[in-house]
Amino acid sequence: MSITSIDKEYVAGTYGRFPVEIVSGKGSILVDSGGKEYIDMGSGIGVTAFGTADEQWLAAVTAQLGKLQHTSNLYYTEPCALLAKALCEKTGMKKVFFSNSGAEANECAIKVARKYSAEKKGADCYTVVTLLNSFHGRTLTTLSATGQEHFHKLFNPLTPGFVHVPANDTAVLEQTVAAVNPAAVMLECVQGEGGVVPLNAQFVQAAAKLCQENDIPLIIDEVQTGNGRTGKLYAYQHFGIRPDVVSTAKGLGGGLPIGATLMSEKVQNVLGPGDHGSTYGGNPVASAGALNVISRIDDALLAEVNAKSAYIFQQLSGAEGIESVTGMGLMIGIKTVKPARDILMACMDQGVLCLTAKDKLRLLPALNIPMEHLEKAIAVIKAACK
Ligand SMILES: *Cc1c(COP(=O)(O)O)cnc(C)c1O
């Protein structure tokens, strides 16, 4: 039996998988069970920040794996402590809670905001304002936060206390905040699953100001945009704002599951003993990998990300069959004349793996994708769009 037929028989049918069995890889190259090579323009949905089986990341992870793979959070471990220190030193945030995924990082963010607001403003201050077209995860509460109806339909009743407002409409946000007395405002600076749509700077800054003036925790969901993806360590840093809570995951672990919720001075002591927890959270192996990833996202790497981004925009903007190119850094959405899925399939055939987001083609290559691979992939995508 093939991998595909076993998977189809035994794995829950939640994914519309493409007809490719990936068996190995190196850097930005993936290899399928037939030996065919692909240039990886998706990096496992923005997860393998330094590509597949990156030497430095692998060394950090395997060294830790041979020493101590898990302890639970009953004890102190070095990788978890050092990762929290690195994240705080690089962002100015004060404390970190570790979990295993983006959804969990957001669950924690919401718990922090609700507890902060309930203690300060009363038990009925629990509503979280999020944006239409957002994506915050698949658990029932993060699904409730997600402002896209089609994810909700089959899973009612959802967690109460979420309202969605249109992105980039400051007036509606102000009216909503005045009307619902929210416990938090939560947003992605670039809506990823929503089609790689960056928010207006004026809107993000107005939201931050509104939150600050009304003592409302501002949660920035950096699950996809974080960890160098947009050309800064975190995307909020493009906007000159200071969020109260930042959630991240995906690229942080470089390929192992980890989520992190960063808390500013204002909310750093909200969670106390027993308020939250995770058996795996801060796992030594995942943390050692993440520490390697975070320590390598420096100015030189970010300059490289921005140069590659400029190359992609320059190559694809205005090209035949391409209506628009959006995004920041190496988080790119391409509105194509032909259906994005057809382009994706044509690229796959030509040995280039891309993603889609809504009706767009989406690219999230490794931050260190070699220029020769990037050039080849962009040429294939460009040809497929014609
Ligand atoms: C992927 C994603 C999530 C969910 O992350 P999981 O690790 O799949 O739980 C949440 N928010 C954003 C912005 C994402 O892109």
Image: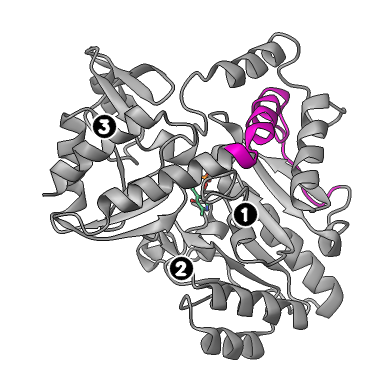
Q: Is residue 4 above or below residue 112?
A: above
Mark 1 vs ligand 1: CB under 8 Å?
yes
User: Residue 106's mark?
Assistant: 1
Q: Is residue 290 magenta?
A: yes
Q: Residues within 10 Å of mark 1 (few under 14, many from 20)?
A: many
User: Residue 376's mark?
Assistant: 3
Q: Residues within 10 Å of mark 3 (few under 14, many from 20)?
A: some
Locate residue 68 relative to residue 307 in the image: left or right: right
Q: Is residue 182 above or below residue 310?
A: below
Residue topped by disc 2: 147
Real-space Cα distance between discs 1 and 3? Answer: 37 Å
State which quadrant residue 209 falls in.
bottom right
Which range is magenta? 274-300
Q: Is residue 344 above or below residue 142?
A: above
Secondary structure beneath dot 1 equals: helix
Residue 303, can we see it?
A: yes
Residue 17, can we see it?
A: no
Q: Residue at x 20, y 47 (%)?
A: 341
N-terminal label among 2 and 1: 1
Q: Is residue 94 magenta?
A: no
